[in-house]
Every structure is written in structure tokens, then in C-alpha cells.
Image (tube, rainbow, N blue to C red):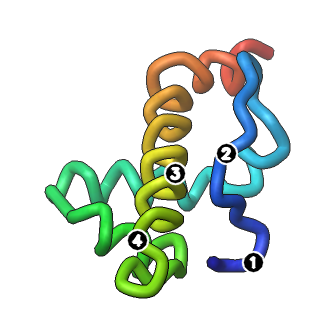
Amino acid sequence: MKPGLLEEVPWSDSITVYDKDNFTIYMRILDACADNASEEEMAKLILGIDPLLEPVRARKAVRSHIDRANWMVTTGYKELFAD
């Protein structure tokens, strides 16, 4: 896994330091989803997890990041513009 990335995204009802540090990862994940990339492709190319060696870990990490990325673009972004 790439440095600074967690297997499971820390969840909060507010934007976290992890969110800010990994915003680019979230955008890459969303872009990959829009391009119909597989979870295996996202795990390997974006998160740096080999899905052949660690399929459960790869799937868990991708899904966690997809969920948080979706939260960021549907809810969390409001905090960015609140000031």
C-alpha cells in the first residue's frame, strides 16, 4: 500500500486530515469508477495493493475509499465552501 494510505478510511461526519491528505486519491478513485475500472485495477494502480496477493485487503481498501470519495462529493464538499 502506498505510504500514508490506510486499508480502511477513518470515518467522520466532518472532513478529516486523512480526507485532506488523500483528496487526490479520492478523485482518482471516482475517475476510475466513471471509466468502469475494476476494483483490482484501482487497488493496484491507485492504492498500490496487489489484488492477486491480497484480494480481501485490496477489495476492502478500494470499497472504503470509494465510499469516502462518494461522501466527499455528495456531502463533505460543503465544508470546503462553508467559510
Query: Of callouts 1 and 2, which one flags the residue occurring earlier in the amino acid sequence?
Result: 1
User: In this picture, is 68 found above or below 57?
Assistant: above
Disc 4 versus disc 1: nearer the observer: 4
Name the residue carrying label 1.
3
Identify the element where label 3 is drawn.
Answer: helix
- The answer to whether the residue labelled 4 contacts the one labelled 3, judged by CB atoms less than 8 Å apart, is no
Question: Badge 4: how crowded within 10 Å, few (<14), some, or many (20+)?
Answer: some
Amino acid carrying label 4: it is Pro
Residues 16 and 83: in front is 16
Residue 17: image tag: none
Local packing at callout 2 (Cα closer than 10 Å; few below 14, some 14-19, many 20+) is many
Amino acid tagged 3? Tyr
Which badge, 4 or 1, is on the more N-terminal residue? 1
Question: Regarding mark 1 in the picture, which secondary structure is present there?
Answer: loop
* Amino acid tagged 1: Pro
Report which residue position mark 2 lands on: 9
Residue that label 4 marks: 55
**Is 80 or 46 nearer to us in this picture?**
46
What is the quadrant of the N terminus in the image? bottom right
Mark 3 → mark 2, Cα distance in angstroms: 11 Å
Which residue is under mark 3? 26
Counting from the top left corner in percent of width and height, residue 62 is at 45, 56
Q: Which callout, 3 or 2, points to the residue nearer the camera? A: 2
Q: Is residue 23 above or below residue 55?
A: above
Between the residue at mark 4 and the residue at mark 1, the CA separation in whole angstroms equals 19 Å
From this view, report whether residue 44 is shown above or below residue 16: below
Q: Nearer the viewer, mark 1 or mark 3?
A: 1
Cα–Cα gap, marks 4 and 3: 20 Å
Mark 1–mark 2 contact, CB under 8 Å?
A: no
**Residue farthest toward the right in the current orientation of the protein:** 17
Q: State the image coordinates of residue 18 (x, y, percent, origin top left).
A: 78, 48
